[in-house]
Image: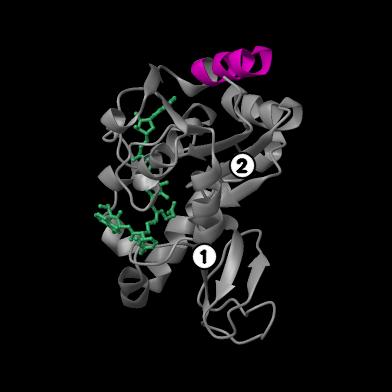
C-alpha cells in the first residue's frame, strides 16, 4: 500500500461526536428547518434575517465545542505521513484547524468568514452578523452574508480539488451521506484515476457501492485506528 498522495473528504459526521448537528440524520438540521429557506441564495433574498439567525446560532454553538479523536487523528496523519495529505471538508466548522490540520480546503465555506456581495471581500468573522453590519472592507451596510456555499452556488477551489483527486493514490471519505454534489461524485473521480477508495462512516452512505472498501462505526473510533494502520504500513 504505497500511497504517495492521499485525499480525504469529510462531512458533518466527523464533527457529530463533538456536538455539531448533522443535516440528514434523524434529528439533523434539515429535519428542523427547510434547507431552501436558509441555504439557498433565494432563501437569503427572501428573508436575510432568518438566514443570519440560523448561521449566528451555529457560529455561537460551534465556538463552545472541541475537536474529537477523529479530527486529531487526521491532523496527525498530515504531520507524520511521508507523502502528501489534502483534507477537503464540506463542513463550515473550524474543528479540523483547531485539531491542527493545515493542508485543508473548506469547499462549502466557513462560518468564521464573512462575504460582502457588494465588493466581494471575504474577511475573518467572529460573533453575530446582521443586515446592519457594515462590510469590514467597503463599509457598505446590507451586503454582508455568511461566507458559505449555498445550494446552486459553485463550491470553492474545485480545480485544485479535481487535480488532487486525479493524482491521488488513496481517497478516504469520512462522515458524509453522499447526498450532495459535486462532493458525492469525488469517489468516482478518484477511482477512475486509479485511487484505492475507502468509506469510514457510521453506516453505509448513498454512494457506498462506489467504494472499494468500507469500515462502519463512529468516526472517533474508526478514523484513529485506520490512521494508525496507514502510518504503520
Ligand atoms: C453546485 C452549506 C454547480 C453550508 C451545503 C447532481 C445531481 C443532483 C443534484 C445536483 C447535482 N449537481 C448539483 C446539484 C445540486 C446540489 C445538490 O447536490 N443537491 C442535492 C441535495 C441533491 N448541489 C449544489 O447546489 C452544489 N453546487 O452543484 O454547483 C457545480 C456542478 C459541478 C461542479 C461544480 C459546481 C453546492 C452544494 C453545497 C450546498 N451547501 N451547506 C452549511 O450550511 O453548512 S451542503 C450541506 O450538505 C453541508 O455542507 C454538508 O456538508 C453537505 C453534505 O451533508 P453531509 O456532510 O454528508 O451530512 P449528512 O447529515 O447528510 O450526513 C452525515 C453522515 O455522517 C451520515 O452518513 C451519517 O451516517 C454519518 N455520521 C453521523 N454520525 C457519525 C457519522 N459518521 C461517523 N461517525 C459519526 N459519529
Bin the neighbour count of mark 1 within 10 Å (Cα to Cα): few under 14, some 14-19, many 20 and up.
Answer: many
Question: Real-space Cα distance between discs 1 and 2?
Answer: 25 Å
Q: Position of residue 20 (x, y in %)?
A: 48, 37
**What is the magenta range?**
222-233
Question: Quick check: is the Cβ at mark 1 less than 8 Å away from ligand 1?
Answer: yes
Quarter that holds the N terminus: top right
| Residue behind mark 2 | 86
- Closer to the chain start, of discs 1 and 2, is 2
Q: Is residue 204 left or right of residue 17?
A: left
Q: Residue at x 49, y 49 (%)?
A: 58
Closest to the observer, 123 or 233 = 233
Question: Quick check: is the Cβ at mark 2 less than 8 Å away from ligand 1?
Answer: no
| Residue behind mark 1 | 146
Residue 158 appears in view:
yes
State how the image is colored: one colour
Q: Residue at x 54, y 30 (%)?
A: 18
- Element carrying mark 1: strand
Q: Is residue 27 left or right of residue 159?
A: left
| Label 1 vs label 2, nearer the camera | 2
Is residue 157 shown above or below 118? above
Please identify the quarter of the rendering in which residue 197 is found.
top left
Bin the neighbour count of mark 2 within 10 Å (Cα to Cα): few under 14, some 14-19, many 20 and up.
Answer: many
Q: Position of residue 160 (x, y in %)?
A: 56, 56
Is residue 14 shown above or below 109? above
The stretch drawn in magenta includes residue 85? no
Q: Which mark is residue 28?
A: none
Please identify the quarter of the rendering in which residue 149 is found.
bottom left
Closest to the observer, 166 or 137 = 166
Please identify the quarter of the rendering in which residue 68 is found.
top right
Q: Position of residue 148 (x, y in %)?
A: 49, 61
Amino acid at each position: 500500500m504505497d500511497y504517495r498522495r492521499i485525499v480525504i473528504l469529510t462531512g458533518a459526521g466527523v464533527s457529530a461526536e463533538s456536538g455539531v448537528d448533522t443535516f440528514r440524520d434523524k434529528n439533523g438540521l434539515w429535519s428542523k428547518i427547510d434547507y431552501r429557506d436558509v441555504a439557498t441564495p433565494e432563501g437569503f433574498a427572501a428573508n436575510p434575517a432568518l438566514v443570519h439567525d440560523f448561521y449566528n446560532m451555529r457560529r455561537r454553538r460551534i465556538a463552545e465545542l472541541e475537536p474529537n479523536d477523529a479530527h486529531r487523528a487526521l491532523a496527525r496523519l498530515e504531520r507524520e505521513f511521508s507523502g502528501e495529505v489534502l483534507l477537503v471538508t464540506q463542513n463550515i466548522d473550524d474543528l479540523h484547524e483547531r485539531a491542527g490540520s493545515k493542508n485543508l480546503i473548506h469547499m462549502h465555506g466557513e462560518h468564521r468568514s464573512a462575504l460582502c456581495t457588494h465588493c466581494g471581500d471575504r474577511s475573518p468573522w467572529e460573533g453575530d452578523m446582521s443586515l446592519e453590519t457594515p462590510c469590514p472592507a467597503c463599509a457598505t451596510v446590507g451586503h454582508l452574508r455568511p461566507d458559505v456555499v449555498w445550494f446552486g452556488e459553485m463550491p470553492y477551489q474545485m480545480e485544485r480539488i479535481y487535480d488532487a483527486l486525479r493524482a491521488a493514490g488513496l481517497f478516504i471519505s469520512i462522515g458524509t451521506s453522499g447526498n450532495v454534489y459535486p462532493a458525492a461524485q469525488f469517489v468516482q473521480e478518484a477511482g477512475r484515476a486509479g485511487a484505492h477508495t475507502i468509506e469510514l462512516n457510521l453506516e453505509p452512505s448513498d454512494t457506498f457501492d462506489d467504494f472499494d472498501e468500507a469500515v462502519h462505526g463512529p468516526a472517533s473510533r474508526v478514523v484513529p485506528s485506520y490512521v494508525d494502520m496507514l502510518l504503520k504500513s
